[in-house]
Amino acid sequence: MDLLAPLTLAPLDPIGRGAQKLVYRHPEDPRVLVKVVNPDFITRHDRKDAFYKRRRRIGHYRAFEREVREHLASRARHAGRYAPCRHLQNILGMVDTDLGAALLVEAVLDENGQPAPSLADLRRRGEFGPREQQALDTFADWALTSNVLINDLSPDNLVWHQDGHFVLIDGMGDRAAIPVRSHSQWLNRRYKRKKIERLVQQIGPEAEPARRKHPVAIAIAILVALLGLIATQIDLLLD
């Protein structure tokens, strides 16, 4: 596989389609997937929001930025050491294609070399048993203790690895205009706990209702996060 060669994807059928991204199998290596921005997303936002074209520096590639940022965040506590995160789909690089810039990611495959089933697939096939439940609990524990931001924890975004664990393939990062969760572990953990409870409700028995937090505690956490964000911007200006 020539990592430097641009790819032609338009004649191919994507194996995955979302509102913002299309996913293709690499034409030369089935172990690699190619993520591009969905052309419909580009057209839709260019038509209704000139801000994307004129003022936003990264434009339509914000989803890629969020994904790369969270991969780095997952390894930040072990900088300078080999520290892969088995719960996030591994990013291999970036390449140019006839559909724009693309992320190269490691495909999660089953024992037959085909795309592995998602959590939604396992539930639909009746293949979600005690082993898968334990793996989902392990993923939830990791999500709540990690500093990774998650915005979409749907059953379709969790894929079953043949080694016996779940991998998050999409839905990473913070879509908020002011990313306060990136500056508050408490808010981040609280947000992810709600996402996990909603996921459990989607795939099985209803989760226990979330414990209500005192509004003063929430307000203090948001204030601390905003102060952290302001301090970060000041540091960048003075650097």
Image (spheres, rainbow, N blue to C red):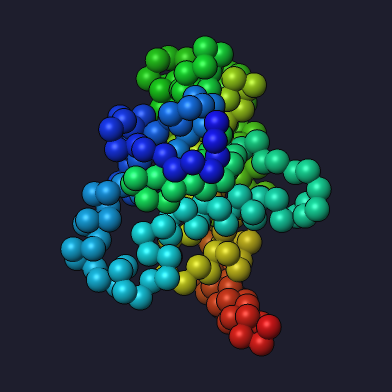
* Residue appearing at x 62%, y 62% in the figure: 186
Farthest residue to the top: give it: 112
Q: Nearer the viewer, residue 85 or 64?
A: 64
Would you say 38 lies left or right of 4 here? left
Counting from the top left corner in percent of width and height, residue 75 is at: 70, 50
Give the image location of residue 83, x and y in percent.
Answer: 75, 43
Number of numbered callouts drawn: 0
Q: Is residue 195 visible?
A: no
Rendering quarter of residue 111: top right
Quadrant of the image occupied by residue 120: top left
Image coords of residue 36 (percent x, y): 39, 45
Given residues 183 and 23, the one toward you in this image is 23
Residue furthest to the right in view is 81
Give the quarter of the figure containing the C terminus: bottom right
Q: Position of residue 210 (x, y in %)?
A: 50, 49
Residue positioned 43% across, 65% down in the render: 58
Q: Residue furthest left?
A: 47
- On screen, 111 above or below 57? above
**Which one is nearer the viewer's eye here, 210 or 5?**
5
Q: Determine if residue 188 is in view.
A: yes
User: With respect to residue 9, does 187 lie above or below?
Assistant: below
The quarter of the picture where the N terminus appears is top right
Q: Residue at x 47, y 72 (%)?
A: 178
- Report the residue at 45% width, 38% height from top: 34
Residue 16, quarter of the rendered image: top left
